[in-house]
Amino acid sequence: MPGGGAERHEVSYDRYSLTVDGERVLLWSGEFHYFRLPSPRLWRDVLEKIRAAGFTGVSLYFHWGFHSPAPGVYDFTGVRDVDRLLRMTDELGLHVVARPGPYINAETTGGGMPAWLKTVEGRARSSDPGYTAAYREWLSRINPIIARHQVSRGGSVIAYNVENEYAVNVDPAYMEDLQAQARSAGIDVPIVHNNCCGGSLANWSSGRGAVQIPGVDDYPQTFNCHDPDTWGGWGDGVTRRLRDDAPVYAAEYQAGAIDLNDAGYDKCRELTGPGYMKVFYKSNIIESGATMFGYYMTYGGTNWGWLAQPNDVYTSYDYGSAITEARTLTTKYDEFKRQGYFVGSVAPLTKTDESPAPTPADPAVATRARANPDTGTQFVLVRHADRRTSADVSTTLAWSTPDGDHQVPVRVNGRDAKILVAGYDMGGQRLVWSNSEILTHLPIAGRDVAVLYGRDGEPGSTVLRYPSRPTVRVLEGSVRSSYDGGDLRLDYTHSGLARVLVSGGGRPPLLLLLGTDETAARFWRLDTPAGPVLVRGTALVRSAHVAGDRLALRADTDRAGEVEVFSPARHLSVGGRSVPVRRTASGSLLGSLPGPEQVRLPELSGWEYRAEPPAHGDQGWTTADKTTTASPIKPRTLPVLYADEYGHHHGNVWYRGEFTANGAERKVVVNAITGRRGVYLVWLNGRYLGSAAGGTQADSEPVNPDPGRGEFAVPPGLLAPGQRATLAVLVENMGHNDDWTADDTRFKQPRGLFGVVVEGSEAPIAWRIRGSRGMDGERGALNIGGLHGELSGWHLPGGGRWQRSPDALPAGVSWYRTHFELDLPRGHDVSLGLRFDDTGERDYRVLVFVNGWSAGQYLHRLGPQREFVLPNGVLRERNTLTFAVIAEEELPGGPGPVRLVTLGNHRTGG
Ligand code: IPT
């Protein structure tokens, strides 16, 4: 029991790998951000999918700002219940690298630091006292939660990551204190760090503030998704060894990309697709000898609410990762599985040294090798010498294996790489060499079952050693065998799934399954207390349980088809239902499963409307009269109108400025900072003056003293001398900058008004401000901003006075809502999205709420996102969909058509 102290283990490490109770562990982890998936039930779904791909762990950032709306206020309930998250990883047996920052970057608002920190004196990410008090507060809350889930206490946390790419403007005293805080909270697992960018930047491998296992982040494919054929734009991606006495740690290894050029995440998935994964991941395994990996991202998720850091990302954080934002599995997932099963099955890989590589007859092919010094097992990387080429080259390796010298034919067709194994005790068998790759092997019911694979249509050969001639039975496919002097050689062409039964020969029987990339990826390996089982044919297997002679699976199907299980069991049930099976010649059980039922979605109609007049409402306004700010960026005019200074940290903010008119006013000049793609709108005496794009920085290089400038002419006759004039300004806050440079000049960039001048007037302006404050119930502080409708709960399901929509929406804020009923098939996991189909060239944006939960922001003209994943966890049978429309111009007909779409449909059983 985690925390119960029942199972205590010792985590240690040496130059080769992490160890648990002296046993070597290969950490093959996938990055997952719980805060980007607002449903603990779906955390488990994603974690099960990650585990099923053969990942042995997950890398988890913990997001300070997500938990803390105000100094001293922390919330770890509901979608912020990270203790529950760690209970899941404990139960699922996934090792965790816990990454609580305090800074995490991650393209999230403030780089994970709370926005209130922008008003605290002292440089963030340094040992300045103001910042120190703040981060110690966070660590004092998060560290005890992490500590009780350590492997050392029977849990899953195997390493603790301090800071994040802390590379420039570094302060060793701060790094030391982060570690001291962790240790005093009972963190006893190894402390790690993720360095960025190599060169002379700080990597914390030695000196003051050094960590035990310094790791390296690497994104060799760049983030230029619009050009997915570029290859290795940021280098070869070989993880550097930073310490002789610690394992090589690929802390964040590129497994997707942010969509910097608005190409769409499918292009990012292409940029980082299976070909890239084969060449870069396998090269790195062999060239670096790393045994600790974190693949960033494995599931990206959604920047719901105001989670995004606007300069790099938009609502979707799909990341082009192996598991899509809608939680469906891709061909990248299959490649992860092929590699993950391999590294998890072949134990000698946890301890290797560089070794001489066999020479290819054709120098167009390159080889690199590692060997385990204890077992002699060799691992040979085979790829093109020029990683970029897509040539098709067949050649021969002159290979001195532990079991003699061999001529091994190899082929590299296109952007591909293979790790070939020689001299390996594969269960009860002896693998001399193979030019097929190993997926996995496992002992089942007194025999070895091994799955090897190669590219469809490529020739393959496998040599196994036997004391005496074994009997070979080809059960399926076309495989030739020959036996000579102890070596059984099998030759075949990879195609479909061939099956060979080898028995006798002085070893336990072997069922050899020879597949292609595609057929190999259809296997699922599961460990149960009754031994491992192998399943073929479903879209996913979440878990296996053996009771007596029955194997019970929790599995998903996306079509009707076969299910085959290799296990000692005689009966099978899937999703709680018994499945009729027959025994095959391979000794497996074969049955069939139904696919999912069709999904029918309702149309969205019956929209209701509600107007939000500018700077509406009398309650909740604060006088904005500050004249100083902790931000190093000082305003253009006084008072300081930065939203954060008045406790309004997220979303939209309304301002109301009053002055006495003289009738000679010419124009209103506004500066506002919103972050990229943000907007602000201005009214004078109730008359809409127009909108402008908000700035991103007040001090970017060269210094910009005039960010987000907008000039608005005062209509003649609008203001009368001696009368009161009222300015109303709505300023969007798209999220807070990160702090990669650790110097406050980015992080403490204000949001909101930066300066307002009424030309032709000397009159002082009395300002008031209204925005969101803290929590929105269980949805948290990042769910809403300060629209009148948000503060009044119009985004929530419920009553209120809603009306028929006018024919044309006025510029400004309007609310829409409708209800829809879902009648989804039971026992299914259906992932839904919302699609905006408007093609008109109009300037508006829409905040989308589902049952009160923000699903993100649609930017009609700016894009690039048109389809929004609805967080399944918040959908029910009867749902309320609410839009806050911010229109920069009058919108005849309102926003364009929207519809629900199905993004995934699986039968999941019970
Ligand atoms: C690196 C960060 O550590 C991570 O949080 C995330 O921002 C990622 O990159 C990009 O998605 S930082 C980068 C300079 C490699």
Image (spheres, helix red, strand yellow):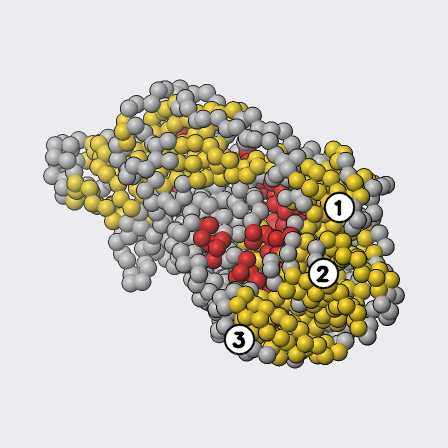
Q: Residues within 10 Å of mark 3 (few under 14, many from 20)?
A: some
Q: Are marks 1 and 2 in contact (CB under 8 Å)?
A: no
For image coordinates 42% across by 47% down, the residue present is 314
Q: Which residue is mark 3?
A: 364
Residue in front for this viewpoint, 774 or 894: 894
Label 3, label 2: how far apart the Cα atoms are: 29 Å
Q: Is residue 487 visible?
A: yes
Instruction: Please state which amino acid type lies under the numbered disc 2.
Output: Val
697 relative position to 69: left or right: left
Specify the quadrant of the image occupied by residue 771: top left
Instruction: Please state which amino acid type lies under the numbered disc 1.
Output: Val
Q: Secondary structure at mark 1?
A: strand
Residue 702: x, y in percent?
29, 63
Q: Is mark 2 within 8 Å of ligand 1?
A: no
Instruction: Please state which amino acid type lies under the numbered disc 3.
Output: Ala
For image coordinates 79% across by 69% down, the residue present is 483
- Position of the C terminus, as image quadrant, is top right
